[in-house]
Image (spheres, rainbow, N blue to C red):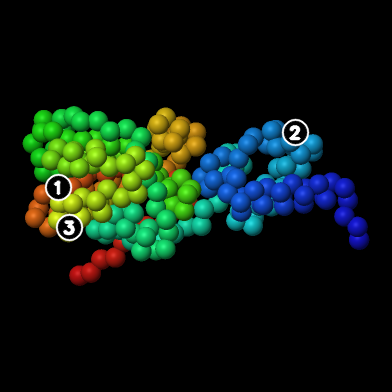
Amino acid sequence: MRESKAVRRYHAVAATLEGRIRAGEYPAGRPLPAVSCLAREFGVARGTVERALVRLETDSRLVSHHGRHWHAHVPTRLQSLGVRSFAQWAVASGLAPGGRFVDVARGRATASEARELGERPGNPVLRVVRMRSLDGSPAMVEHTVFPGWLSATIESLPVDAPSIVDVVEAELGVRLAHAEHRIEAFAASAMDGRLLGVPRGSPLLRVVRTARFADGRSFELSDDRYLPGVVSLSLVTTG
């Protein structure tokens, strides 16, 4: 039985979009063009594009939020929560971690920051916002507070340094030995949305992490905000 013209168009649109996803033209986590824009580009009805998108979602090529904001699907990776940093875990998993400094500012520790870091309120701190990626695709935004004694080392890093931990451990001769994590759902802020390419208020996975060196000094208070579907978190306990 010959396919109708409408079916052929829908298959052609789906095949083209899938090819673009494979080629990385639509980075994982970033919204695709609007349905109306795609319909104009392909010269087809909106319904044809929507049917193609639904098929790609069924094939695990796309993810949507309530049938809107379509974006390329990222295969979920299992990340164990431990002492290792995001970059160290990624490298050990055969993935390429990326990092880009968005904002770096010196300041004074608030009462809550001081409590988490084991510092005194008002002590110098360095606040850093970084965009993180896996294999070139957006993964999460880090909002991190470092104790002031690390400021000069971190400020000297290139803007695209993939790992702060590796540099600090190598240059200062210290090793991370303890980390605690708190996991919760979180609504994307305006900055998170802009960096991750999602609307403000979109659901994110939030991991708040405090880490210390073997000598007891604080390393970081990090508020990591992951795109949904990028990682699954694993926690192993012993008793």
Helix, strand or loop at disc 1? Answer: strand
- Residue at (23%, 69%) from the top-left corner? 238
Estimate the spatial distance between the alpha carbons at disc 2 and disc 1, rounded to whole Å: 55 Å
Q: Classify 110 as above or below 141.
A: above
Residue 201, how many percent across, how many down? Answer: 45, 34
Residue 193, how many percent across, how many down? Answer: 45, 34
Comparing 187 with 107, the one in front is: 107
Estimate the spatial distance between the alpha carbons at disc 1 and disc 3, rounded to whole Å: 11 Å
| Residue 103 visible in the current orientation | yes
Amino acid residing under circle 3: Arg
Residue 30, how many percent across, how many down? Answer: 53, 41
Comparing 109 with 16, the one in front is: 16
Amino acid residing under circle 2: Arg
Residue 202, how many percent across, how many down? Answer: 47, 37
Q: Which residue is mark 2?
A: 40
- Residue at (61%, 53%) from the top-left corner? 22
Tell me which label, 2 or 3, sits earlier in the chain: 2
Q: Which residue is mark 1?
A: 218
Q: Classify 129 as above or below 170.
A: above
- Residue at (88%, 51%) from the top-left corner? 4
Q: Which residue is mark 3?
A: 175
Tell me which label, 2 or 1, sits earlier in the chain: 2
Helix, strand or loop at disc 2? Answer: helix
Q: Nearer the viewer, mark 1 or mark 3?
A: 3
